[in-house]
Amino acid sequence: QVQLVESGGGLVQVGDSLILSCAASGRTFGSYVVGWFRQAPGKEREFVAFISRSAQIKFSADSLQGRFTISRDNIANTVYLQMNSLKPEDTATYYCAAATEVDAPKRPSEYTNWGQGTRVTVSS
């Protein structure tokens, strides 16, 4: 089992950039596909991006219009989410999650391990 801890959230202004980190424990981190989701108050958890085990495949939600980039460092056991041109609608708690059984997981049910989340607030 892998354990995930997110960090890097905070209060930013519209147009700012922010990098979120997802640190994983365990020696099998490289065997997991890792994704980012977000959940705003009163809304369902929303897919943001995922990255394949070797980082060769990266996929982000179309709604983000290329503003967010996912990356990973399997030596450091960390996945990152670079967020640019932040908007108020990006305000949410951001979660990273790990999946083993699905190669291109975009639904929360396809992930088996979750972090506790990190809060991002974009102020106008």
Image: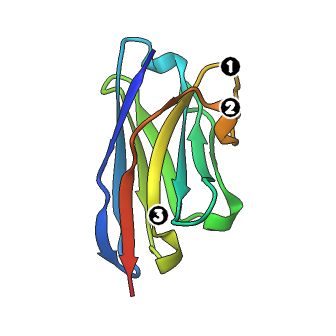
Q: As displayed, is residue 79 above or below residue 90?
A: above
Disc 1 marks which amino acid? Glu
Disc 2 marks which amino acid? Glu
Residue lying at the far top of the rendered structure: 27
Q: Indicate which disc, 1 or 2, sits on the residue closer to the N terminus.
A: 1
Residue lying at the far front of the rendered structure: 42
For the residues labelled 1 and 2, say whether their Cβ atoms are less than 8 Å apart. yes
Assign the N terminus to one quadrant of the image.
Answer: top left
Identify the mark at residue 101; answer none if there is no mark: 1
Identify residue for label 3: 92
Image location of residue 119, percent across then percent down? 36, 59
Q: As displayed, is residue 83 above or below residue 100?
A: below
Q: As displayed, is residue 123 above or below residue 111?
A: below
Identify the mark at residue 91; answer none if there is no mark: none
Crowdedness near tag 2: few (<14), some (14–19) or many (≥20) residues, C-alpha within 10 Å:
some
Q: Quadrant of residue 104?
A: top right
